Image (cartoon, rainbow, N blue to C red):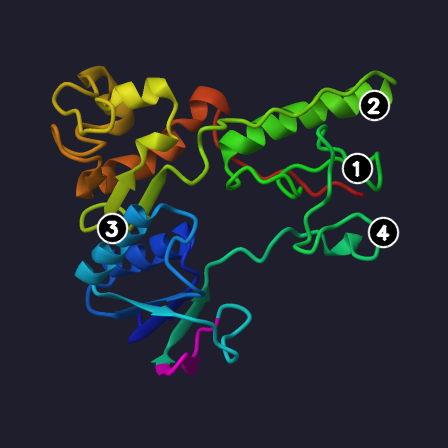
């Protein structure tokens, strides 16, 4: 459907919507790509980052529209339609919603004092439900850590596993400590992968060792990374020598790194064969 479409609308002005829009532009240079943002592009990011992303979208002819639409499809739509956004009427061939619909906690609706107004489980410092002490929450609680990422979830599931064990043994529970507390927004933004794409690293969101790996925020080639790192990230993964860590270089190098690096900490991306569904 996308291959035969003339206009594709992506709904969602966050990092996912932006990445999809950029990926479509790289794959289909001649299509009309429209990115629909509820209020602003990358609203959780600093103004400088938002303006930079807007400039890249303009250069890549990704059209930005702002506002809500009462006639927007609830899910993916692979057939022509019309969207009314503010005072604009946009005809499309494919509609792709690329935004979070919130935590999947609807099955707990109706339990007194369980969920907040956004559907998050209200927890204490142990990530334990205040309404039902036998329930712990990972990634769907009301403690704001900026955004959900592996760096955040890793700390959450470790403390929850320890606290569940402690609860069953009648021992005291340990408080949760935020993982990577310096990271409040995604450190890497993609507007398309590979040749023709664009990516940017925000080293303010990185731990100190990683900052040094890229000359404290400047592209380090040929000094950093050293040739021994090339099998993982290749040369110029963070941009070019003494330049900002953004552009086509990071777009080509940093996409595959997410998969290559899984073996460093998580021991791979999972089993080759998906496990069978277990009975509940």
Left or right, 74 with respect to 205, comes to right
Which stretch is magenta? 77-90
Examine the image and state in which quarter residue 271 appears. Answer: top right
If the image is split into quadrants, where does the C terminus sit? Answer: top right
Tell me the residue at 25%/60% (across/down).
25
First in sequence: mark 2 vs mark 1: 1
Tell me the residue at 43%/20% (across/down).
264
The front one of 112 and 9 is: 112
Q: Nearer the viewer, mark 1 or mark 3?
A: 3
Q: Which numbered circle lies on residue 135?
A: 1
Which x, y percent locates residue 10? 39, 65
Crowding at mark 2 (Cα within 10 Å: few <14, some 14-19, many 20+) = some
Q: Which numbered circle lies on residue 167?
A: 2
Q: Which numbered circle lies on residue 276?
A: none
Q: Which numbered circle lies on residue 112?
A: 4
> Could you tell me which secondary element the residue under label 3 belongs to?
helix
Crowding at mark 1 (Cα within 10 Å: few <14, some 14-19, many 20+) = some
If the image is split into quadrants, where does the N terminus sit? Answer: bottom left
Q: Nearer the viewer, mark 4 or mark 1?
A: 4
- Kindly identify which residue carries mark 3: 52
Q: CA distance from mark 4 to mark 1?
A: 14 Å
Q: CA distance from mark 1 to mark 3?
A: 42 Å
> Could you tell me which secondary element the residue under label 4 belongs to?
loop
Left or right, 14 with respect to 189, comes to right
On the question of residue 270 being in view, the answer is no
First in sequence: mark 1 vs mark 3: 3
First in sequence: mark 4 vs mark 2: 4
> Could you tell me which secondary element the residue under label 1 belongs to?
loop
């Amino acid at each position: 459907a996308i291959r035969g479409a003339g206009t594709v609308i992506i709904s969602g002005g966050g990092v996912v919507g932006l990445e999809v829009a950029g990926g479509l532009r790289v794959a289909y240079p001649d299509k009309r790509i429209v990115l629909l943002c509820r209020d602003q592009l990358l609203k959780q990011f600093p103004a400088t980052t938002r303006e930079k992303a807007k400039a890249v979208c303009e250069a890549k002819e990704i059209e930005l529209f702002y506002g809500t639409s009462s006639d927007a499809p609830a899910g993916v739509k692979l057939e022509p339609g019309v969207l009314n956004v503010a005072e604009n009427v946009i005809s499309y061939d494919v509609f792709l919603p690329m935004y979070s619909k919130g935590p999947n906690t609807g099955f707990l609706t109706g339990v007194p004092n369980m969920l907040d107004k956004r559907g998050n489980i209200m927890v204490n410092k142990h990530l334990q439900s205040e309404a039902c002490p036998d329930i712990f929450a990972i990634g769907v609680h009301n403690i704001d850590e900026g955004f959900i990422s592996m760096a955040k979830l890793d700390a959450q599931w470790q403390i929850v596993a320890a606290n569940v064990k402690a609860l069953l043994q009648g021992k005291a529970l340990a408080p949760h400590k935020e993982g990577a507390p310096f990271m409040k927004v995604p450190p890497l933004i993609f507007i398309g992968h590979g040749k023709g794409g664009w990516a940017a690293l925000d080293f303010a969101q990185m731990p100190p060792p990683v900052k040094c790996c890229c000359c404290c925020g400047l592209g380090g080639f040929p000094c950093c990374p050293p040739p021994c790192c090339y099998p993982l990230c290749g040369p110029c993964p963070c941009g070019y020598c003494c330049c900002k860590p953004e552009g086509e270089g990071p777009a080509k190098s940093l996409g595959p790194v997410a998969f290559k690096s899984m073996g460093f900490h998580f021991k791979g991306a999972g089993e080759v064969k998906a496990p069978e569904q277990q009975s509940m």
